[in-house]
Image (tube, helix red, strand yellow):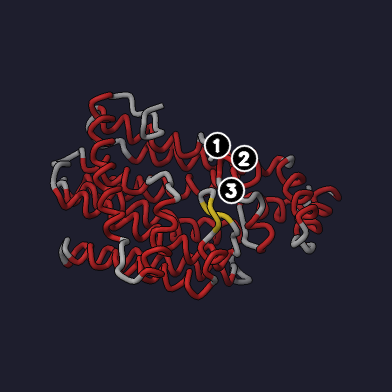
Amino acid sequence: MSSLSLPVADPELTELLTGRLSLVEERLRGAVAHADVLADTASRHLVNAGGKRLRPLLTLLAAQLGEGHRPEVVDAAVVVELTHLATLYHDDVMDSAPVRRGAPAAHEVWGNHVAILTGDLLFARASAVVAGLGPDAVRIQASTFERLCLGQLHETVGPAEHEDPVEHYIQVLSDKTGSLIATSARFGAMFAGCRPDVVSTLVAYGEKVGVAFQLADDVIDLSADPAQTGKTPGTDLREGVPTMPALLLRAQAAGPEGTEGDRELVRLLDADLTDDAALAEAVAGLRGHPVVEETRARAEAWAQDAVRALGTLPSGAVKDALVSFAEALVDRAA
């Protein structure tokens, strides 16, 4: 594994990306700084907690298909990470998540109101940076933000009576996660001067990678060590947030092949999970069910679709790294 925590085989590309990512990190810390002490401290909270920086990394990687040295590429990478960080502040409030990246979630430290407003401040900073990239970038950012909001809205209200819950969930993932990852790849190629067909290829790739990433997260939430993930296992179950394993279980339990064990596990998921022991029992029950492996297989299938979307790109270190990027997102422990 490289210093980027990705299997980028080409050492020259790894060194280049590592240097560029360090520049993004420096710019990111400057972008969240405030003269107001509370705003400054709260805005830096998740930046200081670290993270994978997958979105800016993808921006930088996609840019290597063109003129990746352009300063606009770094600005674009800062924009996508600021946007992502802002969504985390909001998501943790909505999901009542106690921990993020191994640190207490912002709402646990300052309360819901401050956490939400801090997320808004980061969106404002992202808007300020993207404004310098021109009207096309502003429109793309606005469209991405709209999809992020729609994804959260549809997750919150759930599927309509006529909708298939699994298909509804995939659309939620496409909007909540795929949209920003696609924009990350799009910005990289776009500001590196790549041809429109290359940009379109990377958008399709990013959308699919985003769904694969989130499906893998559904598995990790049940099976990984919290010391590695920095999250409390089963938080989504406790808050009633749908995940693919739970949706597949419910579909199976309601169908003709559903067993009494399936239905009992559904009843367990629907019970009061505020007690830690009850939550641990629900997590253990779902973790041992075949729907987890089915979810993992779906994540791998979406990643393979993403790789196939790269078919028209020229062979070389960058394409190889994009393939590795997709594969690494589903083959991870955190």
Is 316 displayed left or right of 117 in the figure? Answer: left
| Pointer 2 residue | 224
Q: Quick check: 304 above or below 124?
A: above
Residue 2: where, in percent of width, then height? Answer: 37, 28
Mark 1 vs 2, N-terminal side: 2
- Which of the labelled discs sits on residue 333, or is there none? 1
Is 128 displayed left or right of 104 in the figure? Answer: left
* Identity of the residue furthest to the bottom in this view: 113
Q: Which amino acid does label 2 sit on?
A: Ala
Crowding at mark 2 (Cα within 10 Å: few <14, some 14-19, many 20+): some
Could you say which quadrant of the image residue 166 lies in?
bottom right
Mark 3 vs 1, N-terminal side: 3
- Could you tell me which secondary element the residue under label 1 belongs to? loop
Is 8 displayed left or right of 169 in the figure? Answer: left
- Which of the labelled discs sits on residue 218, or is there none? 3
Mark 2 vs 3, N-terminal side: 3
Viewer-closest of 212 and 128: 128
- Which of the labelled discs sits on residue 312, or is there none? none
Residue at left offset 24%, top offset 45%: 23
- Could you tell me which secondary element the residue under label 3 belongs to? helix
Q: Quick check: 134 above or below 332?
A: below
